[in-house]
Image: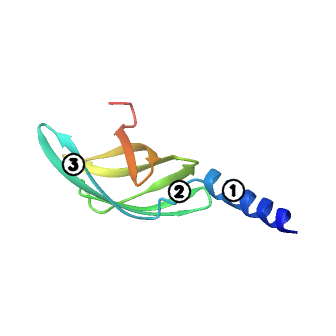
Amino acid sequence: MNRALRLALLLTLLVLLLSGASVSGTWKGRFDYDGTGVPLTFNLKSADDGLTGTVEGLTTTPAEIHEGKVDGDKISFWVTIDYQGQAVKLVYEGKVSGDQIQFTFGTEDGS
């Protein structure tokens, strides 16, 4: 009985580790724009493999997250901002590592 209980606890721990960390919550960071640090706040809510929320600090704020996905330690989504009167789609890809998310982002055409 004791051995079966230990095995069950070990399997439960393994499942929790493989499912990845939850990204739900408020994440703060910044990016460099022409030598100026621009602060951003990500308000994220993950459920199953989906991701919703907003990004604050862009030209359109808050920018609503679209097509958010969580796949293990990888997350992705896009937002639309207004830049000089034009709607611009920004695509975000991130990797969760401990208590940090490292994002890369750019326009839909890769610029």
Extreme left residue here? 35
- Note whether 31 is above or below 12 in the view shown: above
User: Nearest the camera: 74 or 57?
Assistant: 74
The quadrant of the image that shows the N terminus is bottom right
Left or right of 71? Residue 94 is left
Instruction: Tell me the amino acid under the disc marked 3.
Output: Gly
Query: Which mark sits nearer the N-terminus, 1 or 2?
Result: 1
Instruction: Name the secondary structure under disc 1.
Output: helix
The quarter of the displayed image where residue 17 is located: bottom right
User: Where does the image place residue 32, in percent across and percent down from the top left?
Assistant: 19, 41
Q: From the image, state whether disc 1 or disc 3 is nearer to you.
A: 1
**Relative side of 31 to 75, left or right:** left
Relative to residue 18, is residue 23 drawn left or right? Answer: left
| Marking on residue 4 | none
Task: Name the residue at 37% across, 43% down.
Answer: 103
Q: Is mark 2 on a helix, strand or loop?
A: loop
Residue at point 13%, 37% (across, down): 34
Q: Which amino acid does label 2 sit on?
A: Ala
Residue topped by disc 3? 85
Q: What element carries label 3?
A: loop
Query: What mark, if any, has residue 15 been given in the picture?
Result: 1
Q: How many marks?
A: 3
Q: Residue 66 location in percent, x, y? A: 46, 55
Query: On the image, which quarter does residue 26 sit in?
Result: bottom left
Q: In which quarter of the image is the C terminus?
A: top left
